[in-house]
Image: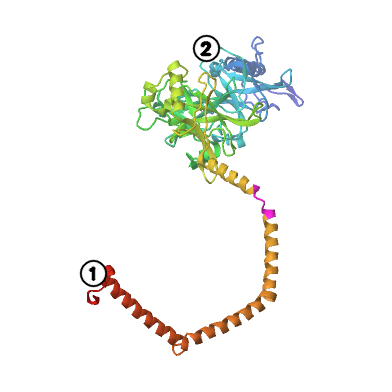
Amino acid sequence: MTSPQGPTPANAPRNDSNGPTLPPNLPDPEIEPRSRWLPSLVWVIPLVAALIGIALVIKSVSEKGPTITISFSSAEGLEPGKTKVKYKDVDIGSVKTIRLSKNLARVLVEVQLTKEAENFAVKDTRFWVVRPRVGASGVSGLSTLLSGAYIGVDAGRSPDELKDFVGLETPPPITTDQKGHQYTLHGDSLGSIDIGSPVFYRRVQVGQVVGFSLDKDGTGVTMQVFVSAPFDQYVGSNTRWWHASGVDLRLDSSGFKLNTQSLATVLVGGLSFQSPPGQAMGPQAANNMTFRLGSDESDAMREPDGEPLRVVMNFNQSLRGLSVGAPVDFRGIVLGQVTNIGIDYDPKTRSFTMPVTMNVYPDRLGKRFRDTAPEPGSFAGQQLLQQLVKHGLRGQLRTGNLITSQLYVALDIFPKAAPVTVDVKREPLELPTIPNTLDELQLQVADIAKKLDKVPFDEIGNNLNSALGNADKLFKRLDTEVVPEARDTLAAAKQTFGSAQATLQQDSPLQSDVHQALQELTRTLQSLNALSDYLERHPESLLRGKSGDK
């Protein structure tokens, strides 16, 4: 190696400008070229990244569950890629896309479930949107105020798989994992009941209403209720159900009635059940067993009525105060209720009658009557009815409450009632009626009023005014003509009385003459008395004379 100063000795120290000074007498390093068959390290990083990506894709594909579509009426609170699907607050999927249905009536939400949630894609699984709600069962979904809405799930148990679902608009009141029994109730009216309304047993909430529907014939309402375990053990075959909705305030022919179960029933209504007092509840009711729903507790606790007898009564008086549902009473026992009130015109008599239709339950007359009475409609039953009518069976309207003037129909025996005939084959059966005592009194008062109305009070008044005028004229004439003459007459009479008094005084001549005459008359009477005594003793003297005169 040479330098600008000349050749460098072999043993001189060598100075390399690109590195440190090498010691002398060291051999030159041998540089071998790098092998060309090994790849460069720069390609390792993309390769590793590609492998990781493939692994993530494989993992993502392996962890994906089925894709399902849920139909909702609205997509309120739902966002693709953000809204989760949760079961018991555990994420089991997420919303992928949201689109409208072809008819624009529904919203189709495409949901990607996880691998662990593939068992949720079955026929009876239910989905709904969880958002803040205020309902009959309380306030729910408050946690979504901060986290946002999500789709709730109730796991199904069906073995049939399904990809398209119709979501619920409200959360289901009962989920499949809750223990208890469901029952069916049939009543005349829904009242104030709604889904989520509470069910009470001895004023303890033990369940809730889970559904209701109107009967196909429109005559009633069918409800589904759920009683949670362990309270479902108190529902037996003899259990009675009734409305305990709100405040039950009644003002009818029986007076005031107030009944309520709790404050919750005042706000949202409710149902209640219990066995009749003194009776066993019977075997535990099976799932989906059907019960009758009473309008109130007294209606529910009443013994089974059997088949009702449809009866009509025609009244010839005002029905003001009588309403549908009014009781039909027999000596204090309610035998039925009024079902219809009408009016009918008779063209023959040209008069109106007021027909009242009612349902009467003969079985309420007692066990002995049920055991001995013939079947209604049979020949023996028709004869029994004719005998009862012959003995005075009649219907009568009576006032049940003087404050409200509410009326009810009373059935009773009136022995003095006028005889009538009844057509026992007519449908519905028509029973005779009789007016009540108050109505008879009103008729009598009306008859008296009619008679008084015929009295000519105006003519009598005119005659009386004329008589009073004549009397006034007479008094004036007496005062002007008769009174002066009466004074003169009184003066003359006074003078006459004075003369008579003077004549009758003791020292007056008349009085002395009269006294002397009376004395002579006395002596004469004494002589006649002696003569009569002598003749009585000596009657022969009338012929012979006195003995001393011979």
Q: Amino acid at mark 2?
A: Pro
Tell me the SS state at disc 1.
helix
Task: Please provide the residue range marked out in magenta.
Answer: 454-459
| 484 up-or-down from 393: above or below | below
Tell me the SS state at disc 2.
loop
Corner quadrant of residue 383: top left
Question: In the image, is residue 291 part of the stretch drawn in magenta?
Answer: no
**Residue 313 percent coordinates (x, y):** 54, 29
Q: Nearer the viewer, residue 337 or 86?
A: 337
To which residue does mark 2 refer? 159
To which residue does mark 1 refer? 537
Q: Residue furthest front?
A: 550
**Tally of numbered discs:** 2
Q: Amino acid at mark 1?
A: Arg
Looking at the rendered image, the disc whose residue lies closer to the viewer, 2 or 1, is 1
Looking at marks 2 and 1 on the same chain, the residue that comes earlier in the sequence is marked by 2
Is residue 296 in view from this perspective? yes
Q: Residue furthest right?
A: 4
Corner quadrant of residue 512: bottom left
The C terminus is located in which quarter? bottom left
